[in-house]
Amino acid sequence: MAQKSRPSRGTTTDGGTPADVAAGAPSPRRSEGPRVRPSNGVDRYFGISARRSTVTRELRGGLTTFFTMAYIVVLNPIILSGADVTGATLPFASVAAVTALVAGVMTILMGVVGRYPFAVAAGLGINAIVAVFAATQMSWPEIMGLVVLEGLLITLLVLTGFRRAVFEAIPAQLKTAIAVGIGFFLTIIGLADAGVIRPGTPLISFGINGQLAGWPLLVFVVGLLLTSVLVVRQVKGALLIGIVASTVLAIVVEAIAQVGARTPDGSNPRGWALQVPTLPAEVVSAPDLSLVGQFSLFGGFERIGVIAALLIVFSIMIADFFDTVGSVTAVGAEGDLLDEERNLPRSQPVLLVDSVAAAAGGAASVSSNTTYVESAAGVADGARTGLASVATGVLFLLAMFFTPLVQVVPSEAAAPVLVIVGALMVNQIRHLQWEDMTVVIPAFLTIALMPFTYSITNGIGAGVISYVLLHVAAGRRREIHLLMWLIAALFLVYFALEPLQQLF
C-alpha cells in the first residue's frame, strides 16, 4: 500500500519524474511559471517544450534507445539465418541489413506520425512463435506472407478503432501491473544477456557454478555499478554514458584477455554472450537488401490449408497485439505520459504505425516489427517526444552501412541499462490496490508470468482471464468492460492453440 508520505504518481521527492532525475532534467517544481513558448517549427510539431524537454535531451534519449536495442541488428540474423527460403538459408548479412532498414524507416515513421519516443524493430517474442512455424512444411516466404496478412488485419482493427478500444478497456490496475511486470521482464532480460542468470537445475542458476566468473560478467557488474552511481548523482545522459564506458572497458578486456565468444556447446561459458567487442577490420560495408519482397501472401494457405493458416495468423496477431499494449503502457508510464486512466493520449497514430510495421517486417522477410519496450531506456534518459524516435531511426539506417561498428557493443555493456530501467519501472507498483484480491491475484499473475515465461503476451493473458473470472466469482460482473469478455475469450483460444492445431 502506498504511504501518504510517498510522492505522487511518477514523481520523485523533488517533484520530478524518475526518468527526469535519471536524465538530470529540471523537475516540474523548478519549471513552474509561464509555459515555455515553442522556439521553432520542430519544437511546435513534436511538442518538445510542451512536454518540458529539449532538443538535446531528445537526441540523447534517441541515442540511448538505439544503443540499448542495437543488438537486434545482430540477434535477428542469428535467429532467422537458419530458416528455409525456397531450399536455401537466409543470408546473415542480408537479414542484418534489412532488419536495420525496416527498424529505421518504421521508427522514424513512429516519431513523425506517432510523435512519441517509441522505437520499432523486429519483435523477438513474435520471432519465437515464427521460429516454431519455420519447422513446418512451409517455406520462409510463405510464413512471411502470413505475417503480412497479420499486420494488415491489425491495421484494419486500428482503422476501425477496435484496437484503441481494447487498449482503453483494460482496467487501470492491470495496466499498472503490466508496467511493473515489464520492469521485471527487462531486468531478467538484462541479467540473462549478461550471463548473471543461466539455464540450470532446476530452473536457472547464478552465474557459472553459482559464482560470477569470467571477464564479461565483470564488465556487466562494473557497468551496472557505474550506471547506478550516475543515475543517483543525476548526471545528464547517465544511461548512455554507462553503455559507452562499459563498451570501452569490454574492448580493452577483450584485447588483453582474448575471451572470445560463448559457444552454444558450452565449451566457453566465460565468453561474450553475443558480440565479441573487438575493433572491426572495416567500419563501412554495403548493405544487401535482396530479401525485401521475398514473401508469398497466400502460399501458406495453399500449403497447409485455410484453418491451420488462420490459426497461425491468429497466434501471431495476439502476440503482436498485446506485446504493443504492454510496451506502450510501460514506456508511457516510465515517461509519465499516461492519463489518469493509464491510457496514452492520442494513441491512434502510434497503434497505426505499429500495425503497419508488422506488415512491413513480413514484406521485407525479417519477421513482424513491433514497438520495443527497450524504448524505456531512452525515456529514462530524458526522451519525451517523437524527435527521439527520429534520431533512433536515423541511427538504424546508418547501421545498415556500419554493421561492423554496431557489433562492437556487447550485450554485457547494454544489459546494465535494462536492469536500471527495470528498477525505475517497478516503481509503479505503489499504485496497485493491495486490499482487493480480485485485483491483486490478476496483477500478481501478470507481473510474475512476464519474466518467468519471457513473454509480455502471456502475462497480459493470465491477468485478463483471471480478472474476469474473479470478478464473476465475487458477483461483480457489472464492473467488467464488455470488451474484456472478448479479450478473455481470445486469450483462452490463444492458450489452447496447441490442441487446436493438432485437431485441425
Image (spheres, grey):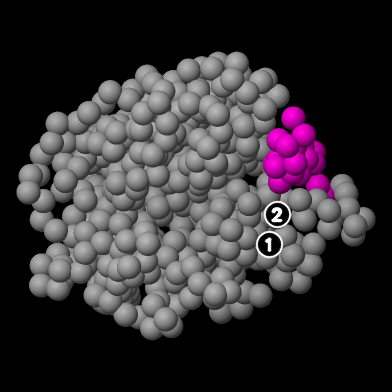
Outermost residue to the left: 281
**Mark 1 secondary-structure assignment:** helix
Of marks 2 and 1, which one's residue comes earlier in the chain? Answer: 1
Q: Residue at x 90, y 57 (%)?
A: 473
Image quadrant holding the N terminus, namely bottom right
Q: Where is residue 39 drawn, in percent x and y?
A: 23, 39
Q: CA distance from mark 2 to mark 1?
A: 6 Å
Asked whether residue 319 appears in the rendered view, the answer is yes
Q: Amino acid at mark 1?
A: Leu
Does the residue at mark 2 contact the one at mark 1 (Cβ under 8 Å)? Answer: yes
Q: Foreground residue, 499 or 421? A: 499
Q: Is residue 27 left or right of residue 424?
A: left
Q: Residues within 10 Å of mark 1 (few under 14, many from 20)?
A: many
- Say above or below: 15 vs 55: below
Disc on res. 445: 1
- For the C terminus, give its image quadrant: top right
Label total for image? 2
Q: Position of residue 93 (x, y in %)?
A: 25, 36
Compared to residue 276, the image places residue 48 above or below, namely above
Name the residue rendered at 59%, 20% in the picture.
Answer: 303
**Residue 40 shows up from this direction:** no
* Image quadrant assignment for residue 481: top right
The residue under the point 57% across, 52% down is 456
Residue that appears at 45% across and 51% down: 373
Q: Quadrant of residue 43?
A: top left
Q: Which residues are magenta?
A: 479-504
Q: Secondary structure at mark 2?
A: helix
Within 10 Å of the Cα at label 2, are there few (<14), some (14-19), or many (20+) other Cα atoms? many
Dot 2 amino acid type:
Ala
Q: Which mark is residue 462?
A: 2
